[in-house]
Image (cartoon, rainbow, N blue to C red):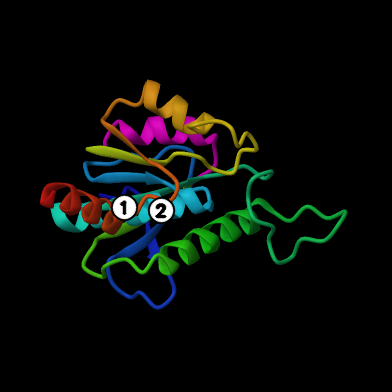
């Protein structure tokens, strides 16, 4: 249940998706929380979490934490000019909406997008206090390719107040099901 006014999220989607105004903390009342930083791993985690939310008839909350350094550039950005914070908020909201739309989620899944102006680990851990499950991609936009988990995923796994699922890069539900069926047939 959202505590703030909601706006449409995701182009072409008219029902079941909303964006909550930018804030520093998100308070959830159940559901699946998935972190999204715009990376391929985050997009895979979003798809995984949405499939689970659909099967379990749970709400799906997509959270994007940001700072001016990690936010996409507003359309008004030019060298030497720092746009107002509202324009950064809009750029973050628009990018998250585009990612949710691009995921091709089942339209019956109830999705709420949240944009939070704080550090990613802090935002995920705080929001997870009200979630039934937190889902993260294994690696985000960090530059340490040799790591099995990204630094945010690692912090969340160790400090989240709810169960955490980490979705590895390249994971595919169909692939896992195919491998399981093949193993059972042998």
User: Which numbered circle lies on residue 48?
Assistant: 1
The stretch in magenta equals: 116-131
Left or right: 84 as drawn, with respect to 118:
right
Determine which quarter of the picture holds residue 104. bottom left
Image point (43%, 37%), residue name: 25
Can you name the residue that lies furthest to the left here?
A: 185
Can you name the residue that lies furthest to the front here?
A: 186
Query: What x and y, as percent, mark residue 78?
Result: 82, 61
Note whether 134 is above or below 97 in the view shown: above
- Which residue is identified by label 2? 44
Left or right: 23 as drawn, with respect to 84:
left
- Secondary structure beneath label 1: helix
Label 1 – label 2 distance at C-alpha: 6 Å
Image point (36%, 46%), residue name: 34
Q: From where the camera sits, is residue 9 visible?
A: no
Question: Between 80 and 142, which is closer to the camera in this rendering?
Answer: 142
Q: Is 175 contained in the magenta span? A: no
Q: Is 120 contained in the magenta span? A: yes
Query: What x and y, as percent, mark residue 92?
Result: 56, 56
Query: What x and y, as percent, mark residue 153?
Result: 45, 32
């Amino acid at each position: 249940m959202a505590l703030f006014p909601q706006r449409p999220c995701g182009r072409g989607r008219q029902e079941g998706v909303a964006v909550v105004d930018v804030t520093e903390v998100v308070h959830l009342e159940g559901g699946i929380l998935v972190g999204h930083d715009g990376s391929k791993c985050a997009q895979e985690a979003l798809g995984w979490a949405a499939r689970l939310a659909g099967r379990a008839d749970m709400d799906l909350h997509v959270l994007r934490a940001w700072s001016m350094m990690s936010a996409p550039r507003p359309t008004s950005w030019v060298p030497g000019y720092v746009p107002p914070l509202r324009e950064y908020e809009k750029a973050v909201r628009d990018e998250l909406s585009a990612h949710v739309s691009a995921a091709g989620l089942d339209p019956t899944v109830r999705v709420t997008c949240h944009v939070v102006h704080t550090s990613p680990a802090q935002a995920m851990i705080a929001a997870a206090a009200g979630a039934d499950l937190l889902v993260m991609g294994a690696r985000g936009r960090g530059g340490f390719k040799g790591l099995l988990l990204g630094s945010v995923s690692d912090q969340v796994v160790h400090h989240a107040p709810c169960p955490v699922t980490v979705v590895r890069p390249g994971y595919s539900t169909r692939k896992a099901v195919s491998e399981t069926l093949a193993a059972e047939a042998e």
